[in-house]
Image (cartoon, rainbow, N blue to C red):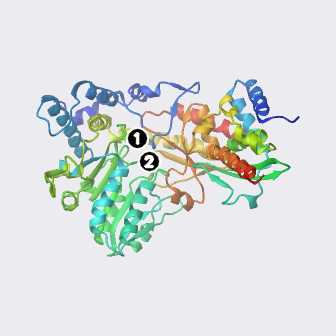
């Protein structure tokens, strides 16, 4: 067997080779070669992932865990193999700390509905930051409304960084949950989550990290971070949509009530009673999204084969190249200028509405995201209604950045 | 005899058929957007707003001599251009005609995506609002 380390050392990063792994990139959109810069919304899928989904349905589809026939055993083994890979991917201590969900949103809702409902009392405080995605705002508001608790907002500075002193001031024994995004989808900011977790733990609060944007770029070690919960989505790590992960510390997950009732999550059922299954099945009621869970392993293996450090190096080169070029445009304002950033470039252009820019770039085959990025409160912090956002992944190239800048120049000329 | 809504639409379709380049079509729409007078700030109120996910549209209407007259505005330029075409088409017609004529020109000039992207802008809601206003005037007649 080849050790993963050996594979990593021998891997030479060639973006043009990488692009061949992503068949979707090789196409024309509106008569122009596709430039896909909407990776923070969802990443494209390598052929190994696409084939894994197809192979699953072609060769091994069966319902998992209950069957005693061969296909059921194969499907169960493939499904559970992903759990092991996820455990390694985030450095969890135990495989049963890895819960399959539909995505980050469901993972956060699960924690709010179970841990939150069981532990939050009237007057308790939940801290979130100003740069949270709606998915990490609304579940806490719902919980706070139900329990008479208070959601407090950690402010950020003009660069889009959490103000640590303000965070410390907000923390108190009343703080029961801190839920913070690891990397901001709208700004690209990498938050110092390890430090934030330490500070929160001193006050006895539990911390959930929204890892939707960090998992494809940064090395994740939930034990080193000492995160109580960590959530991420398959589709943002080159995997399928509709499958996501909730990591939770074993002792917390064990003490939490179940989320949904149904098959799989039960031990014994009578008409007036049920017992709850053990972890992780307790939180996985009903037939899960088996095919996409199976394929997720291939996505994570693909990332690990290349190595996140290699991916980060390539993406950071693109980010600084694009930032340099973009900064030369007249009337540009970068939104999100934190010292620590991933490859997300958000901006507003004086006299140009982001929607117009998005439409004109689309005509040139360039896909970017425009709007509020599901972070309306954050947009109002910056006094804007939305931004244009280009986000880069491991398969993007400098040539594509040039096409994007050229498209921007033409669009701006038309719009001003 | 004044021009019907359908005749105006056919004229717009003819104009666009002369442009085969998308850049030209968008450049034309953008120029239209820059030209329309829009609405004074005092009319850009919460009552007149149609909220889209990305851009806003404001619309007002009045009835004069049995004809409905519209004014509208948007914070996005391409939407403003499309608004200009909708105003040219519908403004100054009877409620009856407005209610009974669909804006088929948008599809024919290749701008259908702006109607189907319902979360992205208020154009669909704008057409709906124009018809609702017309219906309200009709019931008052």
Compare residues A216 and A73 and report the one nearer the observer.
Answer: A73
Query: Within 10 angstroms of label 1, few (less than 14), some, or many (20 or more) residues?
Result: few
- Cα–Cα gap, marks 2 and 1: 10 Å
Image coords of residue A39 (percent x, y): 45, 40
Residue drawn at point x = 26 percent, y = 42 percent: A288
Give whichever of B128, B97 is nearer the camera: B97
Above or below residue A313? Residue A10 is: above
Say whether residue B57 is left or right of residue A396: right
Asked whether the viewer can see residue A133, the reply is no
Q: Is residue A66 above or below residue A350?
A: above
Query: Which mark is nearer the camera, 2 or 1?
Result: 2
Question: Disc 2 sits on a residue from what chain?
Answer: A
Q: Quadrant of the C terminus of chain A?
A: top right
Q: Is residue A153 above or below residue A329?
A: below
Which subunit holds the residue at mark 1?
A: A
**What is the x, y in percent for residue B121?**
61, 45
Q: Is residue A382 visible?
A: yes
Where does residue A391 sit, x and y in percent of width and height? 49, 42
Q: Residues within 10 Å of mark 2 (few under 14, many from 20)?
A: many
Q: Residue at 44% x, 70% y: name it.
A: A166
Q: Is residue B50 left or right of residue A255?
A: right
Residue hosting label 1? A313
Which element carries disc 2, helix, strand or loop? loop
Residue A250: image tag: none
Residue at the disc numbered 2 = A342
Q: Look at the numbered disc 1 and give the secondary structure of its residue.
A: helix
């Amino acid at each position: 067997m080849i050790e993963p380390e050996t594979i990593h050392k021998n891997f030479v990063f060639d973006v043009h080779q990488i692009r061949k792994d992503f068949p979707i990139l090789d196409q024309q959109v509106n008569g122009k070669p596709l430039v896909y810069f909407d990776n923070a919304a969802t990443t494209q899928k390598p052929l190994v992932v696409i084939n894994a989904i197809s192979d699953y349905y072609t060769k091994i589809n069966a319902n998992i865990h209950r069957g005693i026939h061969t296909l059921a055993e194969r499907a169960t083994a493939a499904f559970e193999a992903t759990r092991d890979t996820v455990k390694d991917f985030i450095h969890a201590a135990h495989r049963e700390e890895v819960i399959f969900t539909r995505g980050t949103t469901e993972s956060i809702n699960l924690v709010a509905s179970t841990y939150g409902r069981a532990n939050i009392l009237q007057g308790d405080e939940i801290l979130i930051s100003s740069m949270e995605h709606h998915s990490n705002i609304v579940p806490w508001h719902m919980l706070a409304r139900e329990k008479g608790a208070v959601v407090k907002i950690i402010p950020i500075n003009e660069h889009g960084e959490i103000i640590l002193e303000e965070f410390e001031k907000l923390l108190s024994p009343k703080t029961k949950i801190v839920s913070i995004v690891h990397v901001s989808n709208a700004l690209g900011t990498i938050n110092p989550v390890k430090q934030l977790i330490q500070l929160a733990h001193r006050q006895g609060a539990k911390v959930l990290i929204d890892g939707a944007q960090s998992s494809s770029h940064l090395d994740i070690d939930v034990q080193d971070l000492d995160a109580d919960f960590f959530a991420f989505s398959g589709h943002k790590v080159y995997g399928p949509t509709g499958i996501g992960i909730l990591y939770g510390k074993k002792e917390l997950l064990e003490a939490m009530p179940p989320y949904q009732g149904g098959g799989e999550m039960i031990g014994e059922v009578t008409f007036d009673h049920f017992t709850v299954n053990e972890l992780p099945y307790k939180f996985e009621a009903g037939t899960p999204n088996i095919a996409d869970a199976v394929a997720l392993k291939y996505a994570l293996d693909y990332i690990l084969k290349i190595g996140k450090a290699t991916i980060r190096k390539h993406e950071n080169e693109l980010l600084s190249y694009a930032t340099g070029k973009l900064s030369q445009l007249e009337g540009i304002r970068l939104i999100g200028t934190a010292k620590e950033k991933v490859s997300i470039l958000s901006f507003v252009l004086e006299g140009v509405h982001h929607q117009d820019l998005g439409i004109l770039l689309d005509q040139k085959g360039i896909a970017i995201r425009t709007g509020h990025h599901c972070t309306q409160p954050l947009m109002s912090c910056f006094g804007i209604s939305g931004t244009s956002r280009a986000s880069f992944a491991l398969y993007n190239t400098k040539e594509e950045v040039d096409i994007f800048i050229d498209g921007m120049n033409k669009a701006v000329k038309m719009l001003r | 005899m004044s021009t019907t809504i359908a005749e105006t639409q056919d004229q717009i379709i003819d104009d666009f058929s002369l442009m085969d380049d998308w850049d030209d079509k968008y450049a034309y729409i953008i120029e239209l957007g820059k030209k329309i007078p829009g609405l004074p700030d005092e009319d850009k109120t919460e009552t007149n707003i149609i909220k889209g996910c990305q851009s806003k549209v404001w619309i007002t209407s009045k009835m004069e001599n049995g004809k409905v007259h519209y004014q509208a505005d948007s914070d996005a330029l391409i939407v403003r251009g499309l608004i200009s075409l909708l105003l040219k088409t519908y403004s100054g017609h009877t409620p009856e005609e407005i209610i009974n004529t669909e804006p088929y020109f948008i599809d024919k000039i290749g701008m259908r995506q702006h109607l189907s992207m319902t979360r992205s802008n208020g154009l669909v809601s704008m057409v709906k609002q124009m018809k609702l206003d017309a219906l309200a005037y009709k019931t008052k007649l």
